[in-house]
Amino acid sequence: MSTLSAAQVSARRESLVTALISPDLASIVDLVVWVEADADDVTGGAPVAMAASQVGRVRLHTDGRHQVLEGLDPIASEDPMAFLPYDRECDSPGPRTSRDNAYPYAALRILSLFADPSRSPDLAVMHTPAHFFPEQGGHVGEHGSLDVIQSRAPLLLSGRGVPARGIVDAHARLVDVGPTLATLAGVPETDLRDTGGDLLDGRALTAYLGGEPPAAPKVIGILWDGAHCGELLHLAASGELPGIARLIDAGVALRGGAVADFPSVTLTNHTSILTGLGPGRHGVLGNVFYDRATGERVVPNNSETWHRSAEWLRPAVRTVFEMVNSAVTARGSRADLLRSACVNEAVDRGADYSTMAMIRDSGIASGAAGLGDQLPAADISAHLHNSAHLGDAYYSWATQVDDLGLAQMRQLWGSLESAPTLTWWANVVSDAGHHAGGPRSDIARDSLRDCDSRLRSFLEHLDTLGITDQVTFLLTADHGFEKSDPTVTGTWRPALEAQAIPFRDEGPGFIYLLPDPQT
Ligand SMILES: [Zn+2]
């Protein structure tokens, strides 16, 4: 197959952009984004981020400048604190156009998505928050956008080495989580780099840390998949999430949470969290993407492929587990003790203990998908607030998986000395609840209550051992959520097909231009 010239790519992309920003599609297409060579750049062609919608077109510079090329700026705001305090989000649930929305770190996040040599699409189409597309895998609650609410994950730090400040008006980025965990676990600042020696994209959040670092740090990172930041803080303040409230009392929570990478989907952001790198450097561009180099369609966020996540990491990646292992070994710790553990998490490379490693070792070809009958029964879960939710197959499976996760956590934490230096604990029922009903729905709130019950159970286990105050906790998520509008349906596919340009659309939303078929 021949490849397209740069001029062909540019012309064809322009045709597709023009089709996508047609007023007919305004209810379902929020923005179209891509990168192109910056004609004004003195070096003659550094990539620059572009965004367009039916209202106009803008060139986005990393210094924050917006160069409006046509009409109105479709990215009216990049404010990471938009729709705060939380009442503002609740009072304006949408539908929103891009002019009433905010897209934090737009240029940086778009540039990262398009920085992979063979996996980046030629353009990315963003669904409007209202778009409901069940026939293409969409749910009542969705995420994936560059927008602030779908990109806003909670961020709490608590316990040993974290001065108690309560809720502060600040934000961070999810790429900061890995470097922060590594720093807490004793990784020297000079070692927060990739295998090529380059600095990570994220930075350790040292402004929230204090005191002398312990000689043998014990750090637990907790992820509640898709846990909505505003809801989490609101329910904690209302007394509905006592476990979260306890962590906040003994630490700090950022009201603006942590901004996800783009797209704000699960595997991209789990990887960003646990590597400190954006997708353009770690290589996991989406939950589904195409690799031109191998001709492969990659679907990393699937119960059949989670245990294979390391296969898609680019060579320069170091996971936080690998960073922590090196630091613990360099300190001369006992070789028989676990340095790092990774519970119910796909991105596990290097962890001394890992759920996914057990799945790999089991040799079950279908991965976690083949383990169903080995999981604890959902209907007897001690942490389930409403058994009616088990009618949702994802919620039911997530309940089983999360109970197994808690059992692994108790086992790993038999004593302070034997516990890993870094433990990562992913929970998934929060994602199931928010997909099923959208934020603020009963099922979403119950999913947070279920997660909190497991968290409290684990904290009580540490209390019984008398070691809770020896541990540093970080709690986060991989993305936020918005509720779609079931009346806003449709697909942009016919508009693209009408251009008679060969393409593939993965997601949907990642558009790859394809060479013309050979005649
Ligand atoms: Zn997720």
Image (cartoon, grey):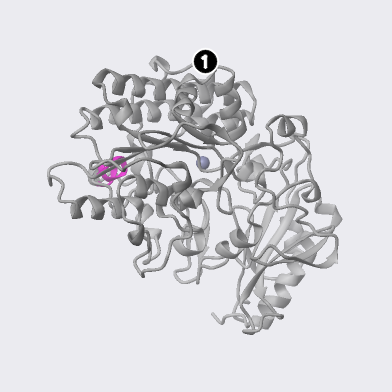
Residue stretch rendered in magenta on the structure: 353-360
Q: Report helix, strand or loop for mark 1.
A: loop
**Mark 1: few, some, or many residues within 10 Å (few <14, many ≥20)?**
few
Q: Residue at x 65, y 41 (%)?
A: 149
Image position of 392 with respect to 266: above or below: above
Q: Amino acid at mark 1?
A: Asn
Rendering coords of residue 333 (x, y %): 16, 47
Q: Residue at x 19, y 55 (%)?
A: 330
Image position of 105 with respect to 502: above or below: above
Image position of 122 with respect to 328: above or below: below
In which quadrant of the rendered view does residue 276 lie?
bottom left
Q: Is residue 229 magenta?
A: no
Q: Nearer the viewer, residue 203 or 326?
A: 203
Is residue 228 among the parts visible in the rendering? no
Q: Residue at x 44, y 51 (%)?
A: 204
Is residue 10 among the parts visible in the rendering? yes
**Image quadrant where one finds the C terminus:** bottom right
Q: Is residue 193 left or right of residue 57?
A: left
In which quadrant of the rendered view does residue 411 lie?
top left
What secondary structure is the stretch in magenta mostly built from? helix
Q: Nearer the viewer, residue 86 or 429?
A: 86
Q: Is residue 355 magenta?
A: yes
Write down the residue under mark 1. 386
Rendering coords of residue 441 (x, y %): 64, 24
Q: Is residue 360 left or right of residue 20?
A: left
Q: Is residue 240 left or right of residue 414?
A: right
Rendering coords of residue 222 (x, y %): 41, 36
Rendering coords of residue 472 (x, y %): 36, 35
